[in-house]
Amino acid sequence: MKFKVIADSCCDLNQEIKNKMEIKLVPLTIHIGDRIYTDDENLDVKELLSVMKSSEAAPQTASPSPGDFMREYEEAENIFVVTLSSMLSSTYSHAMMAKKMVLEEVGNKFIHVFDSLSASVGETLISMKIHEVLKTEQDPPKIVEKVNEYIKSMKTFFVLESLENLVKAGRISSLKGKIASLLSIKPIMRGTEKGEINMLESVRGSKKAFKRLVEVIGEQGEKLEDKILGIAHCNSFEKALKFKEEVQKRYQFKDIIIVETAGISTVYANDGGLIIAF
């Protein structure tokens, strides 16, 4: 195998993407109280949502070890890795540590780790971009250059239906969480250029938040006809489909993909959450 694309398990895929391209996922783990879940194909997301809801403890996530990445680095001459934003997880640093250790043992191998500056479907789009570039470019440094340009231009937004996990984690006070719930406040969040998560604005009511997220695409996006819109939903396919339909009425994206959140993205988005990237 000459080229290999690897991502951590926050890279959300659907069956069509899996059939079209090879993306090897390295799983993170999720800890809720005394329960530990591996974020792989065996994880039951609905069970995870149920356990998160019933537990008083905030869910915690743990990155793959450098050894987990090293095992995946063995097979190909040229390896491209996509990870969660380094501002959100230690996954990027573990992937880089693995790169250093492998190259100390084997010199004739190319490994590049992309900091997605994003998560979920943002990682998905970057992985797809690598495969797209590979169709016309075989020089690894040039591939890295083109994909880095794409990462720099990509934007990520998401809407939360529930603030429950943020309250449990202490990021929002219990009082503020209760007030937001009573007033049906829905935060619209964004990924920054550095890969951090910031509040874009708060909207009252799910319908208004949904509409506002559609509007944000037009306000923040450029040359949409050349881009793919990625939509990730947490246990909310009908909402994602409706969002796609509303976007198609207003904008001309090159393509629109819908994926369901796996474990790590589910912890971030929680039930009913919607994540978009373009």
Image (cartoon, rainbow, N blue to C red):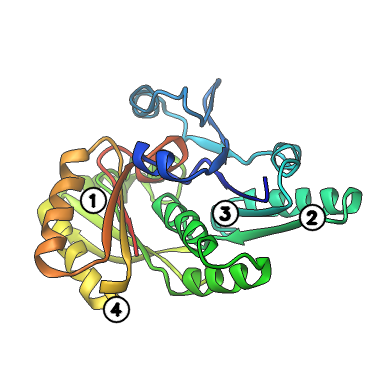
Q: Which mark is residue 82?
A: 3
Measuring from the top left, give residue 177's x and y in whole percent. 30, 47
Q: Is residue 164 above or below residue 46?
A: below
Q: CA distance from mark 3 to mark 1?
A: 35 Å
Q: Nearer the viewer, residue 61 or 55?
A: 61
Q: CA distance from mark 4 to mark 3?
A: 24 Å
Q: Can you tell which quarter of the image residue 80 is in?
A: bottom right
Measuring from the top left, give residue 126's x and y in whole percent. 48, 59
Measuring from the top left, give residue 248's x and y in whole percent. 14, 62
SS type, badge 3? strand
The residue that disc 2 covers is 109
Amino acid type, callout 2: Lys
The label nearer to you, 2 versus 3, is: 2
- The residue lying at 45 percent from left, 55 percent from top is 128
Determine whether label 3 and label 1 are within 8 Å by CB.
no
* First reached walking from the N terminus: tag 4 or tag 1: 1
Amino acid type, callout 4: Lys
- The residue lying at 16 percent from left, 53 percent from top is 243
The label nearer to you, 2 versus 1, is: 2
- The residue lying at 9 percent from left, 64 percent from top is 249
The residue that disc 4 covers is 223
* First reached walking from the N terminus: tag 2 or tag 4: 2
* First reached walking from the N terminus: tag 2 or tag 3: 3
Q: Can you tell which quarter of the image residue 200 is in?
A: bottom left
**Is residue 186 at all visible to an observer of this figure?**
yes
* First reached walking from the N terminus: tag 3 or tag 1: 3
